[in-house]
Image: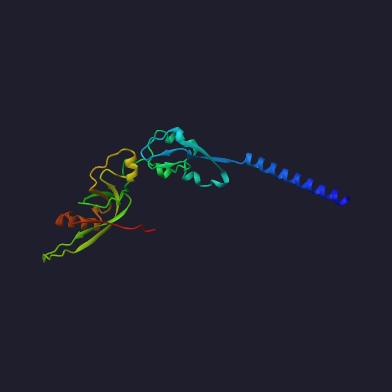
């Protein structure tokens, strides 16, 4: 009998302990600090170039201790008015968070240092993969006094692309903002100045292009140095 009584007491204490633990977890979750991020509602598809509406968005609460650093990359729900009526730079599907880097506005001017200038080079063609921010060189024919049928080429660079025609930033940002690209055969490169003169490689490029023209000049894209 005593054994049975002890078993019953143990069961009751176990249930009581479980109940108290459940109560503690519920109470803790209610008191847990949350951070609300901006997400796309589950039943929504937003195509690139579409104007954002308030109905596209939903609040996504995340525990603050799990969201450390996320605020630097993802919009808070309180940022919703900043995006409302703006055009989507990319397409979204329901359940996605809205990242800040995906909703940049196109830059309106260049950010050049005091010893930098923009040098514009005309080319007959270039790969559409080349965009502002890329590092490129120019493959230019060497002068050929012997009039050989097979020209030799020289790489002159590297240069950072700052603009392509009127495009200063990402092509997708320009397209989403409805800005029409013009003069896409004009590549603006950043060139340093030394004692009031263009740096040597830029002078070499200009001299070579003035003698051979741009028809046979190619643009070479370099990979990331990282």
Vertical position of residue 146 compared to residue 197: above or below: below
**Which residue sits furthest right?**
1
Whole-percent x and y of residue 32? 61, 41
Please tell me in which quadrant of the rendered image residue 91 appears. top left
Residue ID at (57%, 46%): 65
Total marks placed: 0
* In the foreground, 105 or 2: 2
Q: Confirm whether residue 25 shows in the render.
A: yes
* In the foreground, 99 or 119: 99
Q: Is residue 35 left or right of residue 122?
A: right
* In the foreground, 49 or 119: 49
Residue ID at (47%, 45%): 72
Whole-percent x and y of residue 111? 33, 45
Whole-percent x and y of residue 16? 76, 44
Please tell me in which quadrant of the rendered image residue 173 appears. top left
Residue ID at (47%, 36%): 57
């Amino acid at each position: 009998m005593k054994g049975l009584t002890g078993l019953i007491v143990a069961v009751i204490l176990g249930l009581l302990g479980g109940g108290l633990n459940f109560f503690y977890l519920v109470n803790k979750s209610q008191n847990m600090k949350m951070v609300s991020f901006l997400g796309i509602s589950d039943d929504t598809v937003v195509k690139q170039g579409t104007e954002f509406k308030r109905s596209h968005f939903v609040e996504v609460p995340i525990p603050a201790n799990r969201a450390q650093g996320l605020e630097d990359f993802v919009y808070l729900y309180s940022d919703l008015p900043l995006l409302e009526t703006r055009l989507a730079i990319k397409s979204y599907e329901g359940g996605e968070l809205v990242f800040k880097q995906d909703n940049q506005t196109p830059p309106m001017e260049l950010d050049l240092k005091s010893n930098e200038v923009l040098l514009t080079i005309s080319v007959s063609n270039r790969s559409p993969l080349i965009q502002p921010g890329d590092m490129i060189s120019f493959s230019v024919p060497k002068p050929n006094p012997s009039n050989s049928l097979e020209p030799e080429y020289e790489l002159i660079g590297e240069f950072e692309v700052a603009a392509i025609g009127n495009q200063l930033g990402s092509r997708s940002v320009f397209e989403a903002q409805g800005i029409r690209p013009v003069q896409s055969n004009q590549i603006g490169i950043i060139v340093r100045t030394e004692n009031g003169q263009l740096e040597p490689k830029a002078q070499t490029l200009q001299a070579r292009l003035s003698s051979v023209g741009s028809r046979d000049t190619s643009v070479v894209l370099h990979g990331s140095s990282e």
